[in-house]
């Protein structure tokens, strides 16, 4: 893959990268479509990264429908599908990791220790292998997006990060590979997450953070089968507690519906 990427770089081609863990859905397809339109060459990577899963998380049961994913890539004009093995990316002698301090410790990072170290490391490796001009990330994984933006800036990575809007079902549920874990009843309940966040965003005026958060927590807690990990309003750019200099905000939530953990967010 790196040899192929170098050849395209020497030929003056602009390469776009869509990093994924597979189980592709319409959200991924929207990222692929942007790369196909913007770049000379589109690379989709599929790699279920073991270093971003905790010991009690779903690495082994994470869906891996590779043939279906490959067909989706073919239908959507992807030039290269890069699917390395875990041993290719993290051989036994591997000792180096990338961390984005502070930003990795809030929101999901409080509950998934080491998760974003794994994410930042594998994305930096993918950037070094594929050498993309642009890389496409969805805003559903908002903390991941902001951490990757910070990493590329701090490490002087040439790749431009393209943030892409959340793709949702008709009822508002953000598309996710984990949605397949939901029972029909849980799936119906999960649609309430986006509805509550959207309603909260309409009420927010920059000064009523406490009341908006309190109302959102109360409503999310009433969703059948729900358990809240977090609901927070943070600075949009830095993921820090908002202060007088904050001009844009994000309302982010992680909510368990049954045994499935779902994340969502809205910009304020």
Image (spheres, grey):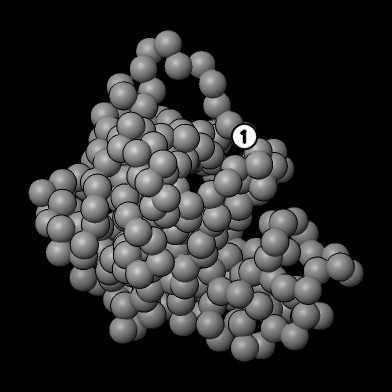
Relative to the observer, which residue lies in front, 4 or 112? 4
Q: Nearer the viewer, residue 220 or 237?
A: 237
**Where in the figure is residue 172, as x and y percent of width and height?**
38, 80
Q: Is residue 121 visible?
A: yes
Asked whether 59 or 91 is in front, the reply is 91
Residue at figure coordinates x 26%, y 29% from the top left: 85
Residue 258 shows in the view: no
Which residue is at a point 65% across and 38% down the rendered structure image? 155
Q: Is residue 177 above or below residue 147?
A: below
Q: Which residue is label 1 attached to?
A: 99
Left or right of 111: which side holds 261?
left
Left or right, residue 262 beside residue 204: left
Q: In which quadrant of the rendered image does the N terminus lie?
A: top left
Residue 4: quadrant of the picture? top left
Query: What SS does tag 1 mark?
Result: loop
- The image shows residue 170 at horizontal and vertical percentages of 31, 84
Position of residue 226 measured from the top left corner of the image (x, y, whole percent): 43, 64
Closer to us: 166 or 231 = 166
Residue furthest top in the image = 93
Query: Residue visible at 39% across and 37% down?
Result: 6
């Amino acid at each position: 893959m790196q040899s192929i990427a170098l050849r395209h770089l020497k030929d003056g081609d602009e390469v776009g990268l869509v990093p994924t863990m597979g189980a592709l859905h319409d959200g991924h397809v929207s990222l692929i479509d942007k790369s196909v339109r913007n770049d000379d060459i589109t690379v989709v990577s599929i790699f279920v990264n073991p270093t971003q899963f905790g010991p009690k998380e779903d690495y082994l049961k994470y869906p891996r429908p590779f043939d279906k994913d490959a067909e989706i890539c073919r239908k959507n004009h992807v030039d290269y599908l890069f699917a390395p093995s875990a041993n290719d990316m993290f051989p036994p002698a591997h000792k180096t990791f990338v961390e984005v301090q502070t930003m990795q410790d809030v929101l999901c990072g409080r509950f998934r220790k080491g998760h974003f170290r794994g994410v930042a490391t594998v994305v930096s490796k993918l950037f070094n292998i594929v050498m993309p001009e642009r890389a496409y990330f969805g805003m559903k994984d908002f903390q991941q997006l902001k951490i990757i933006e910070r990493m590329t800036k701090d490490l002087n990575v040439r790749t431009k990060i393209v943030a892409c809007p959340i793709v949702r079902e008709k009822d508002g549920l953000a598309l996710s590979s984990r949605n397949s874990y939901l029972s029909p009843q849980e799936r119906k309940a999960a649609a309430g997450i986006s509805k509550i966040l959207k309603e909260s965003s309409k009420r927010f005026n920059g000064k009523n953070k406490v009341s908006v958060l309190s109302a959102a927590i109360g409503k999310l807690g009433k969703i059948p089968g729900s358990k809240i990990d977090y609901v927070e309003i943070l600075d949009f750019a830095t993921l820090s507690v908002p202060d007088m200099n904050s001009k844009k905000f994000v309302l982010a939530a992680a909510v368990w519906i049954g045994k499935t953990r779902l994340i969502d967010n809205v910009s304020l």
